[in-house]
Image: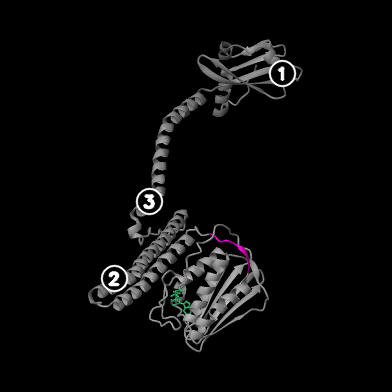
Amino acid sequence: MLWYFDLQDPDESSVSARVKSVYMIADANGVVKEGSPTYQAMGYDSPAYIRSVLNSSQPLWQEKRGAGIHYLIRAFYIYNDDRTHKFYLAIGTPLTNNDKVLTEFTWLCIALIPLLTILGVATGWVVAGRALRPVIEIATAAQRISGSNLSLRIPERKAKDELEYLVETFNDMISRLEQSFIQVRQFSTDVSHELRTPITIVRGQLEVALFTAETAEQYRDAIVTAMGDVERLSQIVRALLLLSQAETGQVILQLQTLDLVETARNITEQFEIPAEGADVTISFHSDSATCAGEFDRVQIERMLSNLISNAVKFTPPGGEVRVGVEQVNDHAEIAVRDTGQGIAPEHLPHIFDRFYRVRGREEHASPEKGLGLGLSFVNWIVKAHGGTIDVTSEPGKGTTFIVRLPFHPDVAGPTVPQDTEPNS
Ligand code: ADP
């Protein structure tokens, strides 16, 4: 075979030198015509392989090994000058460099994997540490908060992320807990105060009677006065017991069909005599003949009594109390209006709290001091019926309580003990 290349061109010379070092030529029958010693040492290709290359439109590739060196062999066919015969030509190139590169790459990978693993673990450690630091700070701050220092808050991070949301939620929860603790503490203080005052008075009266009373009449007077305060004490205890039972869900409404028009008219009539005594006009009005629904009779009567007795109690002589019941859409609306002394705006949000009384005011119709529990009961009764209560008031002009009750509250169960009388 003749090799044509430009002897002056260093590139062509080196290519031809490389090609000539690994090659073989065979005829169409697979008979080897020429081959480099290297190819021969590796073993010439079989006639079957040669035929498959001659019949293939694409060059075929194979790998061969000789003298410890890998060769990549490209086999294809060529024609003689007058294109009468096909010849098989295979040219190889050593893969020494590729093998070297591959080996170096493999070693590099082996060396890098532990290094990268260590680097990955270290980075993960640092990143996780940073991400978790605020969580640890939150946990530490939360541990400092106890029942005795609920005013503490977890410092806000001023970062609009999920942790900030967690901190806000946590702080809100602590605020609610603090509010509950304050209420419980206030309640215990109020209860002790309410109970201590009559006990001290009774004790004082009995001591005075013991040391100064001489006649049976004087003893009797002392005992009668003491009895009045003892009655007030048991009234407070009964009311508190009932209220706590109600608020802890132990008292469940006993629903029955009840006409609110008839009930409210009856309760209003019961207050005609006390109102007359206080020189207060009391009246009942309803546009509807009936306003029937499912209600707990005892509780509704208690609610009306509390509202009407307050209205009469806090209305000066010459004033007026008006009670009304109307059916508005799907609920009943009970209104108790008075032209009394009213409630200052700063007191309005608290009047439903237990023992809350507006200080320094004279109660006209009743010289008896209220317990400050009546509206707490009213509030519970309304809520238990699934209703709402609104109050509007103008000092010196009067107060209006409006109770809205659904006709069919979604509650039922055992009733309240009937012997208790928690009217304030
Ligand atoms: P009590 O009547 O036993 O004091 P309540 O819980 O019934 O307790 O009422 C709480 C406070 O709300 C009353 O002490 C009074 O100051 C105020 N209040 C309630 N109803 C009226 C009203 N109709 N007019 C003016 N003040 C009222």
Q: Residue under circle 3?
A: 139
Foreground of the two, 346 or 351: 351
Q: Position of residue 300 (x, y in %)?
A: 56, 69
Instruction: Quadrant for residue 182, please give it.
Output: bottom left
Residue 249 location in percent, x, y?
50, 58
| Res. 238 image quadrant | bottom left
Q: Mark 1 belongs to which amino acid?
A: Leu
Q: Which residue is mark 1?
A: 54
Q: Secondary structure at mark 2?
A: helix
At label 2, which amino acid type do we have?
Arg
- Sequence-wise first label, 3 or 2: 3
Queried whether the magenta region covers residue 232, the answer comes back as no
Q: CA distance from mark 2 to mark 1?
A: 129 Å
User: Judging from the image, what secondary structure is the residue with disc 3 in?
Assistant: helix
Mark 3 CB near ligand 1 (8 Å cut)? no
Q: Position of residue 365 (x, y in %)?
A: 46, 82
